[in-house]
Every structure is written in C-alpha cells, then in structure tokens.
Amino acid sequence: MSKFNLSDEKLKRAVDNAVLELIRVQHEGRYSTVVLPIWLSSGAAVSVCIRAIGNSVSISDQGNSYLEAEDVNAQRTFSQIAQSIAEKHHVSYKDKAFSLDKVSFDNIAGAIGVVAEASRAAYDLAIDKVSERSEKNAKFEIDQKLRSYFPSHAVAKDVSIRGASNHEWKFSNVVTLDFRRKAVFEVVSSAPVAVYSVVTKFTDLKSLENSPTRVSVLNDRNGIGDLIRVLQQTSNVMDAQFTAEEIEAVVA
Amino acid sequence: MDLKQIYEAEKELQGELCWFESDGVLRLSCSLAIHGVLLEGLELYARTNVEDVDKDVVFMLRTGSKKSGYELLERICWRPKRPHSNKGRGPKKHRFTLITGGHVHSMYLNWYAEEGRMLKSNLPIAEPLDINSLNIEEVFNTVITRFSIKLIGQKFEAPPWQRDLFDYE
C-alpha cells in the first residue's frame, strides 16, 4: 500500500513551479519568443524568436547578446568572434544576430538550444577578451616605455628566470643594465591574487646569490591599497606612469 | 575621482534629451557635468528597441569612451523582456534570485571595494525595483534621482516607438 507523503508532494509542486519559471514562452501573432534558462555572464537570460515561414521556421536571438556587448563597448570584439562561434554551433551570424533558417517543425527544440547557446558563448567570450586585452595593453605599454629609456636590445620581454628554489618564473620584462646587472620588471594589477603571485616570484629571486633588481610596476596605484607594502617587502614599486628620474632611481 | 565618487556626486545633465535611432535601436545619450565640469565620457545612456512599445527600456550611468571601453556604474531595466539571474553571486539574499520585473544593477551591489572597481561582466548583480507599474516619464524621474542627475530645464519625452494601429486606444 502506497503511503501519501506530504513533503514529497510539496517537493514535486515546487520543482514543477521552478521549471515553469525557468522557461517562458510568449506568442505574439506571427512570432513566438522563448526565454531560456541560459544566462549571459551579465546575468541576462537568453531569448530566441521563432517565426514560421511556409513549412519551416526561422529562429533568431534578434541580436540581443550583441546589444548587451555594445553596452560595454565590446561590440567590435563580439563581431570579430561571432562568425567562428556560429560555425562551431552550425548556425548563421548575420546582421548582429545568430539564427537558423528553414528549421522543420520537428526540430524546433534542438534548434532553439543551439541558437541560444551560440548567443551566450559569443557574449561571454567577447567580454572575457575585452578584459584580457586591457591587461595585455598595460604590459605592452610598459614594454614600449622601457624601450624608450633603454637601448632596445637591452630590454627583453616575457623572460623566464630560475629562482633560488630552481623553479622557473616568467616576468614581464628584464633590462640588462650592463653585461651582468639586470633589473626585472613585473606589471602588477590591483587584484590581491596578482600581488601575492608577484611577491612569491620576487621572493624566490631575492634569495639568489646575485639577485637582480626587482621592480613592481603598478597598473592601478589607487586600487591596490595597503597591499603596496607587501610588494615593497621584495621589490621596488613604481607607477606605470613612471618618469625618467624614477626609473633611474630604481635601477641605479 | 574614483568611480564611486563619480556615482555619488551631484551631476548636471548637459544638452538636450533627444532619442535617436540606429540599427532599429532607439538611443538616448547625454553628457553629464560634475561641479560644472564635463567629465570625459560620463553620460546618461538609454536604449530600447523601436518595436518594443512601452517596454524593455534600459537606462545606464556610464563613463569611459568608445576607444577605451565603457564602465557602467548603474543600470536600470524597466519592463524587461528577459529575466535576470544573479547566479551564485553577491550578498546571500540576492544569490540565485530570478528577477522577472523591473530591476536595478546597483552601483553598490557591483562595486568591488578591494580593487576600487566595478565587477566584470556588465554589472552582474541586480535587485528588484518596483517600477513596472510606472509609466516611462515616471521611470525617468526615478532614474535621474537614483543617478543623482539634475535637469537644467530639459524635458524628457517618451522614446518614439513605432506604434502600429493596435497600440493606440
């Protein structure tokens, strides 16, 4: 004999309601809109629009992800990557929208999922690339600046050096001041984890017998707060907008 | 001035409040001044689709430029077509909430104090804002109050949506 359990029933109802909340459908005459439980990194849900054209349907994200990317000026990056995302998902990218045409009525569900997933993937990748680029830009600018103060052949970038532990570390730049003296530069963002990472690297270099001069170059002095004192334990610290006098002082 | 100070400062709206259309999107973009000084890239920006009559308008307070990229300080969504999820981010009471109505991606919820910057990914944390019952003019007043924007004689008008005959009563 089955036993009625109130909590089982409550759970079933709660889950059913949750599922209903997750997927929304709106029918507006010639087209329908489906909002899916797929979320952009901004938190916005992905929606697709379905239109019947003859015996098949057309499914499009209506350029919604592009528009969200545009809010933070990531639209150029979005456009650059959209085509390859489209190819990967076997959908089309045209007029800022991901779409699939001539989908049979039997395949609507699968097609909705693929268009929505392409839309999400393009947005998230564009946002990641834009953030990554700002960090790369900072490294590039420091490299260019060092080359304006020192002969170009004396400045090397992305250099690997072994520390006292024998572990090999990678640094943004190394300037060879004369044949033996070296100054190692590392660009540091204000993220605490970036500070800890640089301190670890420089601690290992500091223990070397002929330890090179170590310089932390701050991307954002205001944002770093009192962690600047942690950096000072193992390196000289200067702003990314350093002057000729400052660079001379730290490498002297 | 850091981003938080910009957000909290009294701002004056410069120029006219005019909607313009590009690629089927109606946009509003107005420069803002603090203590009479126009800060580079600081603007009140809004967008809505031409066909989304009386719904889905997004208002933003943002700074930056087309070249360097925009930094959003706060975003308000009125009658959004798509819900928002905070995923597992933000203070406990906001985590995993699904917001279907009007909401605000507030400065304070998205401010990463430790690093003095906004969270990445376009202000990912939002909280409900009871504005869906308001009309667009009332929403605009709510927006400028939240963004600490003072009008200097400008008048706000509803976006010139493309209404078809059925939209009129």
Image (cartoon, grey):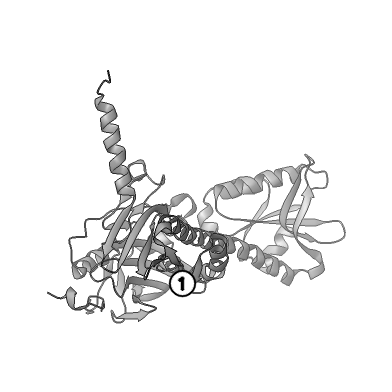
Q: Residue at x 39, y 78 (%)?
A: B23
**Residue visible at 32% across and 78% down?**
B14
Q: Which chain is home to disc 1? A: A
- Say if B69 sits above or below A45 in the image: below
**Residue beneath the point at 26% across and 32% down:** A10
B36 vs A103, nearest the viewer: A103
> Looking at the image, which is closer to me, A221 or B102?
B102
Q: Residue at x 17, y 74 (%)?
A: B166
Residue denoted by label 1: A96
The C terminus of chain A lies in which quarter of the figure? Answer: bottom right
Kindly identify the amino acid type of the residue bearing the numbered disc 1. Answer: Lys
Q: Is residue A218 above or below residue A163?
A: below
Residue A38 picture location, percent across and down: 42, 53
With B62 as the anchor, is B16 left or right in this view? left
Q: Residue furthest front?
A: A55
Please indicate whether residue B15 sits to the left or right of residue A250 in the image.
left
